[in-house]
Structures are given as structure tokens and as C-alpha cells.
Amino acid sequence: TGPLKDMNFSIPEGGGVRFVYQFTSKPPAVSFRATGEKDGIIVIVPKTGILYLNGSLDWETKTVHTLQVESLDEKGKTVEGPYAVTIYVEDINDNPPEFDQKKYTGVVRQNSRPGKPFMYVHATDRDDPTTPNAQLTYSILHHFPNPYAEMLFQIDNVTGAISPSKTGSYYLDPQKQNIFTLVVTVKDMAGMTTNAFTSSADVIITVKESLWKAPSTIRIKENSTQVHPVNISQVHANDPDIIYDIFEREKLPRLPFSIDKNGVIYVTEPLDREEKDSYTFFVVTKDNEGELVDKPLKIHVIVEDINDNPPVCQQALTVLEVQENEGGGSNIGTVVATDMDEENSLNSRLQFYLESQSPDVPSPNLFFIQQETGILHLVGGPLNKRIASNYSLKVMVTDPVFQTICDVQIHVIDINDQIPIFEKSDYHNVTVAENLPVGTVILEIQATDGDEPATGSSHIIYQMKEGDPDNTFIIDTDPETNRGFVKINKALDFEAAPVYNLVINATNPEPLVPSVQYNSSSLALFKVFVTNVDEPPVFQKTVHKAEVFEDIPINTLIMTVEAYDPEGDSVRNWLRIDSATGQIHTASTLDREQVEIYTVEVVASELNNAAQKSKTTFVLHLQDVNDNPPRLGTDPPVFCYPLSGGERALIQAVDADELWYYSAFSFSLADDMNTRNNWEISKINATHAYLSMKHANFEEKTHIVPIIINDNGKPPLEGKVNLEVHVCRCSSEKSCF
């Protein structure tokens, strides 16, 4: 009750008949009158001044009713007023949310990026949008079929955006299941109370094959004369609004390929197969923030050969020797040429032709060359050194396009009718220790030959004819003196071979005349005694390497390091190691983030003689597992008064685990009403996001903002961080007073 004046009332909608107010009057007023937006519901009793509702107000029909109330005397003339009486209708949650479609349909591509929306659902609520009555939240109620423990799809509870989950991005396959039905619900009251209204709609999703596929191997002919760049292939992304890019891992000085905004791949310059015969690079898709959208595609390019290289003579001058008595048809040597074009192709097929012979006596056709192999034969032999001691040949070598001339000189030498003769037939014996180094000379030998000096008929080749099946020894010859040097070619081993009974023979590279044969004069005997040396144990390998995951249990078997003693004694290994078997076990928890590579020296010694020991290196490389949740790597942000709303601070996520090529982190706020009403977070790249104020009404204090950071590991880990945010009056250095 009160005097007549301008008044405002707030009345919840619904509720039926109810009393609002009673106005009092001053004489000579005897009654009241109300005009305006009464809508048949708002009534004033003339005699008593009681203002009441004879029905329910409806916020959805009308939110404000404006009346004019005045007091009247007995003649109906105005005494007071008119005064403005305004009734504000308060909304109550009396309307369920409604989807704008009863059934939705959408299409998603196989291997689409998790979290990338491919469709939206939308609902409205007739209640007051400024109140929780019309704050809607979306969720997926059912998922048909759902063959996995996790749902293949997810929905943004605020926007209604539907996207593949991480599980869906990996497992969706139209060959296995191409139609899914989701039952999507929407709740008002932000889904926070059990009294919220709920509506649902079906979402029919069709899974289609991914467009993002690597093309088959691309083949490009080298040294193309086309105008570059040249279109060589095209890739297609599943998302329309993406950016294509190329990267390579070979660290080439330049990558002669590019890609345009439509996914068309170009070669940007002519290629040279002889410089590089193949290329491998990757095509990626990125969004507008530079984040990867799809997994990289591996592109393989083969550079096809064309005939652009002439034959090349292996030697500027090929020198061969022929004995005077060489018979017709004899193989006297080979002309060797090469071609840089593709091996085993027609472009590198070489053919040989004899162009000329000088002198042409006693016949112009003394020699013949095999067309495909370059092997030279003597045709018109035997030769006579007195007629011509040297012949010069011109050999033309051709491939299908080019030709080259190779020069050949043939020396006619004396016949090989003398055999090498050793200065003594028995060199007796020599005693050497088994640890003598490889390459050590243990004996010098000498044979002589009476044929023409400095020719193949008089040059001597020494070989082990008997007693050395494993080529433990080797003999080098001094070409000036024909002196031989017997050397150790492989490590000696008393336990395997304590004695060698050797037979050495001496021969010529040129064949003997038919009437002469090698005999015992070209043989020599030699005996080698090997003495025992107490050797240290021997490891099977010089370096032992292993890779294990950092979270393997203690006492896990890593590797067996084996050593043996050449003399047959037992070997003991010193380390955190099984002394009999060499098995290495972990002795404590391993952590890659502290030490990634362990290098250990393993020592093996004899049981009966500890002084005899050997060492080997064991390298243990820890592979990363995703065992560290992400965390914030920034100092607490400071926001300075006065605030205008919308202020933001840059925050960074870090992770002790190894970062891979794909996007590292995703950011979100904790799912509580206070946090979401005051703050919002938006990702800007793989490791950074903006934390923004949603309004300017913040108290001057330290606020705690709960942030959730997810990494992209396998399995993914979630880090929950309470970020301190200081809101205060600041100094000029933006620090709180």
C-alpha cells in the first residue's frame, strides 16, 4: 500500500490471479482509473485502488506492460496523476528447447582431423536468452552402432559442432561401416539442474572414403624442354578451406617441386637423372593458423633416363701385350668404356667397332673386336716383332645416339719360353707369435726369369699353392726386382692353426709356349710355426646397441653380451650383469627426460687370470613414451585496472616428452559455470593460446583459472593446471603495486 506515484513492478510470468499493490488517495479523490496495456489481465479496483492480476502474465507474449494510473473526484475529474506504472514480466523456465530440424544428415571423410567440425545442429529456446533458462548445452545420448569403447564422434556442448573424436579419426572406415546414427540432446538451464528441459534429434552421418591419398609414383623424363613449372600430379584434401605445403627431409640444396592452393604439384625446373634419379618429399595440409590438418602424404618421383651422355673410355690409352707366338683367335685383352645413362637400359648399351689399325702389316685385319663386349682377338697371328713391335688401334664405341673413339696400343713381346726359378727350393721355417699384427712381413723370397725384361713374360706372380686354405698369408711382388714379400693377411690363431706347411709357386701373367711347362724349379717350401700368447677374452661385437622404452620394469632383460677366451678358459663379465651369461638387466627406473643415452663399458676377464680382460661398449638408447602431462610454461599474467573487457594474455604449454611433427597441444577451460562465464581460451598455434576476459567486472585480487591441456601423444595425457591471474592496479612496468 502506498500513495499514487510512478512505480515499477517485476512479476514472474504464470502464477494466475495475484495481488500486486494498493494505491491510497488524497481528498477529494474517491476513485482510481487505469489505462494502457492491461491486455485484459491487469485490473485496478476503482473504489479501493487495488492493482491485481486476474490471470497469468506471459514473458514470451509480452515482457513489459505500461499503465497510466490516476485518482478521480466524484465528478470524474483527475485529482492526481496520471502516473506511470510499469510491470516487468520475469521469465521462468517454461519452454523446452527445440531443434530447428527433426533429423539432420551429414557427411564425414575417412581420416578427417579429430575435432574438425563437419556439421552443426542448432536448437532455440523461447525463454529469456539473458537467463540460464535459455542457455543450451548439447550432448550425444546414443551412438548406433558403436563398436569401440570410446565414441567415434563428439559434439561441442556450446556450438553444436559435430566432429570425429580421436578414436573416430583413426577407426572410421566406410568399408567397415558407412552409416552411423547419433541421438543428440539439447538441455536448457545450461544442463546444470535436473529440472532442465531436454529435447533430442537424430543425426544420420555418412562416412565416405578419404580424398587425402598419395598419388602413385610419379615419373618424369630428365632434361625436359617444356616451359616450367609443369603440372605432374594433384592431391585433394577432405577439408575445403586448407593450405597446401611441401617439405622434405633430405636437406637438399633446393627442392625442384611446388604445390599451389588447389593441391596441384609442379616440377619447377628440368631434372637431371645423372645428378639425382629419384626424389621423396611430403605434402601437408594446414589450417589458417598453420596447424596440420591431415597426416603428411609421401610423394615419390622417379626421374626417367634419356640418352644424354656419350660413351667414355675408361683409359685414355689402353695398353695390351701379345706374344710373338700367340695363335689366331686368342683373346688379347678388353677395351673398357662406360656410359652415365641408366644402367642396363638401351641408352647405356655400348657397341664396339674397330675403325683402324696402324701399321697395317703384315695384314690390315690382324685384330677383331667383339661388338657387345669390347674383347679384342688376334685374327692374323702369329705376329713378328721384327716386322712391327707395336700396333695402334682406333676403336669406336657407340650408344644409340653418341659415339666415342678409344685408343689402343698393342705391344708385341718376346715369347714366354723361360719359367721363373727360385733362388732356393726350401726357405726352411720361421716362428712367429700369434699376436703379430696383420701386414707384418715374415719372409722375403726371390725368383728370376730369363725372358724379355719388363714384360708379362718375365714378371713374376707369387702364390700360396698349398697349405693356406684360408688365405692367412699374402705375397706382394716388387715389379722392379721381382722380389716377393710374404705377409700376414689375417690374424694368426695358435688354437686354430699352430703350424703352416706352405708351398709357394712362381708364375708369369703371360702363358708359356706349348713346349715349356712349369716344374719344381718354380716351387719353394716354407714352414711357419705359430706360438701361443695368453690372449684376453674376445667379445662377439665391438659395440652393443639396444633401444628400450623408458618405462620398462626393473630387472627387465635388455641384452646378452657374450665373450669367450681364445684359450678356452671361462670368462667372467663385470657389471650389473649376469657374470656367466652376460645378460644385462635394468637395476632402477629409467627416465628419458633425465638421460636419453647410456654408454656403458663392459669388461670381461678370465676366471683363472683376472689380469687377462677385454672391454666392449654397450650403448642403451631410451625411446620416449608419453609419460609426462603437459603444463604451463608462462608466468602468471597480470591485468591492470581500469579494465574494459576483452583483455587477453598469451600462455604457453610445454611438455617434457618428445614433441612430434603433429600439433602438440589443445587447450580448454574447466567445465564449471564460474570459469566459463568469466574467461575464454582460444588456441593460436601448436603450443600457445590466448586467455581472454569476457567482461570488465573483475575484483582486484588473484583469480584462479582452471585450464585443461591435452597433448597429442599415444596414449594422450591431460594436464590440469590452476593458473594464477593477477588483477590489480599496476606500476609503469605492469607489475602490481
Image (cartoon, rainbow, N blue to C red):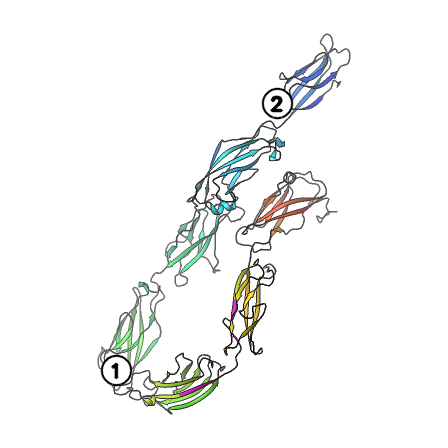
**Which residue is found at the position 43% from the left and 84% from the top?**
499
In this orientation, does residue 449 appear?
A: no
Q: CA distance from mark 2 to mark 1?
A: 125 Å
Point out the residue furthest to the bottom here: 424
For disc 1, the neighbor class at 10 Å (few under 14, some 14 to 19, many from 20) is many
Q: Is label 2 in a helix, a strand or a loop?
A: loop
| Of residues 607 and 350, the one drawn nearer to the viewer in this rendering | 607
The location of residue 202, given as percent across then percent down, is 49, 34
Determine the image quadrant of residue 67: top right
Q: Determine which of the numbered discs, if any, sits on residue 509 in the image.
A: none
The location of residue 231, given as percent across then percent down, is 40, 51
Look at mark 1 in the image and give the residue it sits on. 326
Q: Determine which of the numbered discs, if any, sits on residue 58 in the image.
A: 2
* Mark toward the viewer: 2 or 1: 2
Determine the image quadrant of residue 358: bottom left
Point out the residue furthest to the right here: 27
**Which residue is found at the position 42% from the left and 80% from the top?**
472
| Of residues 296 and 16, the one drawn nearer to the viewer in this rendering | 16
**What's the amino acid at mark 1?**
Glu
**What's the amino acid at mark 2?**
Asp
Q: Which residues are magenta?
A: 526-544
Determine the image quadrant of residue 598: bottom right
Point out the residue furthest to the top here: 75
The location of residue 308, given as percent across then percent down, is 35, 63
**Mark toward the start of the polypeptide (2 vs 1):** 2
